[in-house]
Image (spheres, rainbow, N blue to C red):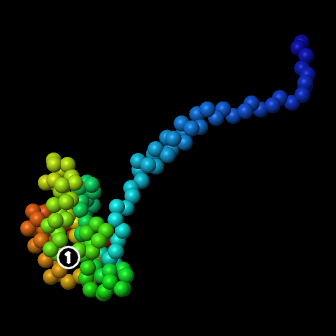
Amino acid sequence: MGKFNKSGKKEVPAMNTSSMPDIVFAVLFFFIITTTLRSETLMVRMKLPTASEVQKLEKKSLVTYINIGPPLDARLGTGTQMQLNDRFAQVADIQNYIAQEKASMNEADQPLMTVSIKADENTRMQYITDVKQALRKAYALKISYSARKGEN
């Protein structure tokens, strides 16, 4: 028969790290693709109204937001303000804003653009009506209202 002998302890081979950069790159690439960055800083206080029938918007890349509510900074006043991108604006500025947003889109996507009005629940309806009239003049006819799902 064969002879078995213990000739010292055998060492564990070193771990192969040649594929480590590939794995790190794949994970990094995954997080870059799946992460969305906030495009604007919210400057108005907003508590969305509740609604019983809520639907999610399908293509968020085609949505332009108009934020309406009292400003977060009390130095800017307590009345209703409208935020377009990262600045406060007046109702008269909506037509230029919509024209700029349409110009930045693909020509095929321009008719599919939706304007989402995110208004505080205490905003007066007259202000919303003025915004809707300005959107009508700018030929932005697809309008949605942002709301949170209410209890039945």
| Quarter of image, res 43 | bottom left
- Answer yes or no: is residue 147 visible: no
**Residue 90, percent across and down?**
20, 76
Vertical order, 117 against 103 (above or below):
below
- Coordinates of residue 105 in the picture (x, y in percent): 21, 52
Q: Is residue 43 above or below residue 16?
A: below
Whether residue 130 is visible: yes
Determine which quarter of the picture holds residue 12: top right
20 lies above or below 116: above
Which residue does the image show at 16% across and 48% down from the upper left? 107
Q: Residue at x 59, y 37 (%)?
A: 20
Q: Is the residue marked by circle 1 packed among few (<14), some (14-19), or many (20+) residues within 10 Å?
A: few
Q: Position of residue 60 (x, y in %)?
A: 27, 57
Residue placed furthest toward the top: 1
Q: Quadrant of the N terminus?
A: top right
The percent position of residue 63, horizontal first and vertical second, equals 24, 59
Q: At label 1, which amino acid type do we have?
A: Gln
Q: Nearer the viewer, residue 10 or 75?
A: 75
At horizontal 32% and vertical 77% (from top left) the residue drawn is 44
Count of numbered circles on the image:
1
Residue 61 location, quadrant: bottom left
Q: Quadrant of the C terminus?
A: bottom left
Q: Residue at x 27, y 61 (%)?
A: 56
Give the residue number, with chain letter if any, for mark 1.
90
Between 28 and 104, the residue placed more toward the observer is: 104
Nearer to me, 142 or 81 = 81
**Is 5 on the left-hand or right-hand side of 71?**
right
Element on which disc 1 rests: loop
116, above or below 59, in the image: below
